[in-house]
Amino acid sequence: MNSTARSGGGTRAVVTGIGVVTPCGLDVASTWDAVTAGRSGIRALASVDVSDLAVSVGGEVRGFDPLRHVSRSDARRLDPHALYAIAAAEEAMQGFTPADPSRFGVTIATGSGAVSLTQDAARTLDADGPRRILPGVVIYGGPDAAAAYLSQRYGARGASVGTAATCASGTVALGDAMRVIRHGYADAVLIVGADDCLNRVNLAVNSTLGALAPGFADEPSRASRPFDRSRSGFVMSAGAAALLVESEEHARHRNAPILGEIAGYGVTSDAYHPTAPRPDGSGAIAAMRAALDDARLSAGDVDHVNAHGTGTPMNDEMEAGALRAVFGAATRSVPVTSTKSTTGHLLGAAGTLEAIASLLAMRDGVIPPTINLDDPAFPELDLVANVAREVRVRTVLSNSFGFGGHNAVLILRAL
């Protein structure tokens, strides 16, 4: 068999570059150090007036200077999520030049897109009239705007698109990139998940829905509590995470370091409720089983699960039940963690960030902890609580579930 072929046929899709901007750090090294140390990036919100909101904590990106990555005029024109995407892409793209630009594409995965840009424009329209609205709102206000920007920056002449599937957006984009490369439509795709919904409108609405953890003003780092009995909602965060996905042949031809393979992908819809998951977890179960089948693996081949693990009562209960259904008797022996406990929930960027965490867990032989897990609600799961666990990891299942019933799962594997 050709060295670039996956079991069952087709070209392997491998990850050769990663980059992040998160509440835990402005690059991969600082973020991974914080996540493995269990050092929370969640703080009292400083950039948003939360004086009359039920929520006062979140995962803000701190110390970020857009002028290190774009011109002053672009820094004014672009939405914050796009600026984070550009910075994360810069780190992921180091040393990469496509052999054929027409076979190199860019996808931006985002749950909400340029919300700050469009909300600010609406306020300007109401206060000052239509002539004060800058035309850049049309150019940079779409969910694909950062993809178009990055395609110009890096000369990518393949598909340049935006993908939206709420909190599963990043995982869907990575799964689609795997399929594009596997079937020979591209040599490389830059996938960037990015979101910044830390504004009064989005915080107020998600709080009204009961999705966000209230309180914790005096101890914000304790707010994100996946799988704990006292969990009360997720903690919203901003940021971006980028992965350069290539065919194995393209990567080896340029002697690129390979972090791992995207070996399987499963995606389903609950078709049930706008915000709540199916209580029986059938959509999530089907997505996990589809990803395993796609990778030609069984549940017993999985060394680690990076859970969606939002810390909402319904999600964690559903996900725990779905894991029991998929792993059966092996449930107690597969280490499970939720890195959202330290980073918060990056929404559309969560799947890309957690794919990176999965790859680094394989690289370093360490599973990050689920912090604030003081009273586990699901003792049948082997939850990595509060302290990282050193263990050999070769295969990871990474879950992403979202409002609207989106379920997307990746299998990441070491080569």
Image: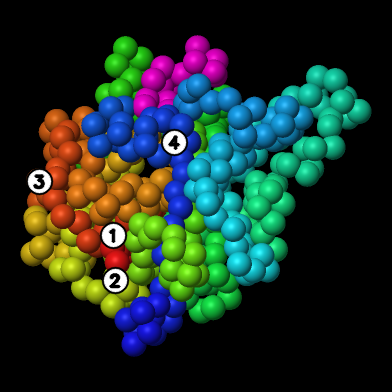
* Mark 4 or mark 1, earlier in chain: 4
Is residue 306 at least partly visible in the picture? no
**Tag 4 residue:** 27
**Tag 3 residue:** 379
> Measured from the top left, where is residue 217 in percent x and y?
36, 15
Query: Quarter of the image holding residue 160?
Result: bottom right
Secondary structure of the magenta portion, mostly? loop
**Tag 1 residue:** 397
- In the rendered image, the quadrant that contains the N terminus is bottom left
**Tag 2 residue:** 292
Marks 1 and 2 close (CB-CB < 8 Å): yes
Closer to the observer: label 4 or label 3? Answer: 4
Identity of the amino acid at label 2? Leu
Is the residue 172 above or below the residue 367 in the image?
Answer: below
Q: Nearer the viewer, residue 231 or 414?
A: 414
Is residue 68 at least partly visible in the picture? yes
Crowding at dot 4, Cα within 10 Å, few <14 / some 14-19 / many 20+, comes out as some
Is the residue 372 above or below the residue 105 in the image?
Answer: above
Please report the residue visible at 79 percent of the width from the left and 24 percent of the height from the top: 124
Please report the residue visible at 31 percent of the width from the left and 49 percent of the height from the top: 360
Residue with the most extreme bottom position: 1
Q: CA distance from mark 4 to mark 2?
A: 31 Å
